[in-house]
Image: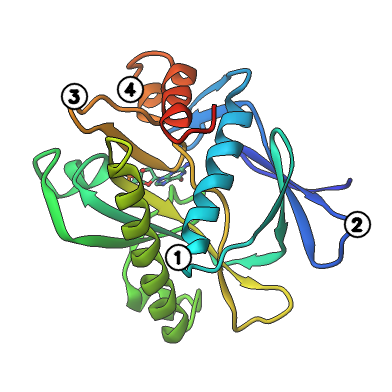
Amino acid sequence: MQLLYEGKAKKLLSSPEPGMVVVQFKDSVTAGNAAKKAEISGKGALASAISIKLLEVVSAKGVPTHFVKKMDERSFLARQVEIIPLEIVVRNWAAGSIVKRLGLERGKIFEPPLVEFFYKSDSLGDPLIGESHIQALGLATPEEVERIKQLASKANSVLKEYFLAKHLKLIDLKFEFGRARKNHKEILLADEISPDTMRLWDDQTNESLDKDVFREDKGDLLTAYRAVAQRMGLI
Ligand code: 5GP
């Protein structure tokens, strides 16, 4: 399989099946636009298993995704998409960048959940943008933005409920969407959904079970990701 693209946490490989790609998770973990990096053996397999399950969970509730089938312990087959260069962050409670940016209290509830757009650009540090910026930069059409907001809100509410049943609070998460290669009008939820891209807190102790463990040196990342996988019944 040919390497099509290598990111910080994943590789994209070609697939013999037309219109498909293989998403392969690496054992690398990075934070702060790769200012902080580590290799954690077993992390890729955990992020892959969790992502596959969560993509299946949202898909079963009507959110179309790029996921097709599991390939091996750290990769899955996906429909090829043209990634829209936006990171869509949905927040149920305040944490992370919004706390600093707006001077909010950590843990403040957002009802309804807050949807934010960030321009996906490593060189610019993924700046927060609004819908007019998306139009001005020609990143997505107004119809696509509406569809993305609808799908992101739906996926968030499905996952929030899913995790609550596992005694985890879904604080926030980041989605990426793409246009299907075969039908450009079709918007698919792409990328991954894992503790690398979300904040999950234990509903009793508010202990972080996500990448904040690494970002903020709060303990062992693998232990946290294993705890999530265990609560999801994956291990
Ligand atoms: P924040 O804006 O507070 O830094 O992030 C909000 C949520 O989106 C968090 O769950 C965070 O993990 C996720 N997120 C935002 N930007 C990125 C990114 O560039 N990479 C990854 N893996 N997650 C991100």
- Please tell me whether residue 13 is drawn above or below residue 225 in the rendered image: below
Marks 1 and 2, the one that precedes in the sequence: 2
Q: Of the two numbered discs 1 and 3 on the same chain, state the one appearing first in sequence.
A: 1
Alpha carbon distance from label 1 to label 2: 29 Å
Q: Secondary structure beneath disc 1? A: loop
Residue 142 appears at what percent x and percent y? 41, 85
Q: Is residue 141 left or right of residue 169?
A: right
Name the amino acid, label 3. Thr
Between label 1 and label 4, give the one nearer the viewer.
1
The answer for how far apart the CA atoms under marks 2 and 4 are is: 41 Å
Q: Is residue 73 visible?
A: yes
Q: Residue beneath label 1, please? A: 61
For ligand 1, give the image quadrant.
top left
Confirm or deny contact between disc 1 and disc 4 (CB under 8 A).
no
- What residue is drawn where x is 46% and y is 27%? 230
Residue indicated by mark 4: 216
Q: Secondary structure at mark 4?
A: loop
Residue type at mark 4: give it. Answer: Glu
Residue 224 found in image quarter: top left
Q: Which residue is mark 2?
A: 16
